[in-house]
Amino acid sequence: MTLTDIETPAALIDETRMAANIARLQTHMNDLGVRLRPHVKTSKCIEVARRQQEAGARGITVSTLKEAEQFFAAGFADILYAVCISPDKLDRALALCRRGCALTLLVDSVVAAQALVATGHPFEVMIEIDSDGHRSGVQPEDAVLIEIGRVLHAGGAKLKGVLTHAGSSYDLNTPEALQQLAEQERALSVRAAERLRASGLPCPEVSVGSTPTALSAQSLKGVTEVRAGVYVFFDLVMANVGVCTPENVALSVLTTVIGHQPEKGWVIVDAGWMAMSRDRGTQRQKIDYGYGIVCDASGRAIEGLLVTAANQEHGIISRRDGTADPSLVERFPIGTKLRVLPNHACATGAQYPDYHLVTAKGATEVWPRFHGW
């Protein structure tokens, strides 16, 4: 199959770029002496995760039990479900454990811990730590941390350790700020682990991670593993954060020119917001990329062109500076194939049932992707 054979819109993975992205973070983690446990929610693709595993990753992180079930069926046995589990999902988690999955669960409240131990199954469990005020988790110095640990330990669960996600790193854009947050993430997680141990509770693992802090960390003393997801593809939000460039983005959307509005300087393509997603994450960053950077069919960015607006199935390509450029009609006639780099790889990937892998030789193959919870 070639690009001209692919019906658009379609999600493409640039194999060369993806391989470089995988190697980059794996090498950094190896140099810092910690395990890398990739977050597979970005790709939700068995073949992508196998590439990460082949490069040296150990275990995977998931955000849904559907991911855990699908990846376990494909041979991935060491799985961390990195969302605090609700009581109604415990039976499903238990079914996975009974089939041989080494599944680790997450809690951040006494109530959730009590529901978990009430099953009578010795689940492996981590306690989520809030290291940056971004989302969920308990404060490292809060008394409830020890209370949760005691409920789990006394109830027969295996208290595996602590986990945090410094998601506020997405709001940063300088190396200094990212390094500072990476150190804060590390230090607060290690402090939480020390408090558990000082209370006579087991805490063998300290798990941290976000793509920006993973790539920016200078030391991971006391940390046992790092989790990151979007690094495998990168995207324009990450380019604005400063941990990659648009040239590193491995995921793109293949689209076809279907019309023009010459007087407005518009090229109309068949990739609207259903193809790109509604994610406009770069809108509040230093560079607003609209719905994505426009590239030629080989993946080279075309200077000054963005998908500046989108309807459900229509994308509007125009100049970033807002000037009407009638020459675009001649440059991109109807039927022209283009690629668009996305704002958020996770959100754009979620629009598709599969990826088309594009190799250095230009050949493609189809890798399935799954949906749901």
Image (cartoon, rainbow, N blue to C red):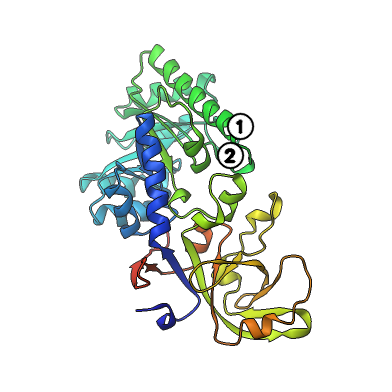
Q: Amino acid at mark 1?
A: Glu
Question: Is residue 278 placed above or below 155 in the rendered structure?
Answer: below
Q: Dot 2: within a 10 Å radius of its alpha carbon, few (fewer than 14), some, or many (20 or more) residues?
A: many
Residue found at x 47% / y 21%:
192
Q: Quadrant of the C terminus?
A: bottom left
Which one is nearer the viewer's eye here, 267 or 299?
Answer: 299
* Residue 331 found in image quarter: bottom right
The residue at the point 44 percent across, 35 percent down is 107
Residue at x 56% of width, y 40% of height: 167
Mark 2 or mark 1, whichever is nearer to me? 1
Q: CA distance from mark 2 to mark 1?
A: 12 Å
- Does residue 308 show up? yes
State which quadrant residue 352 falls in.
Answer: bottom left
- Count of picture labels: 2
Residue 48: % across, % down: 35, 57
Q: Name the residue located 59 percent from the left edge and 58 percent from the top edge.
A: 343
Local SS, label 1:
helix
Q: Is residue 134 left or right of residue 349?
A: right
Instruction: Give residue 169's mark.
Output: 2
Is residue 120 shown above or below 282?
A: above
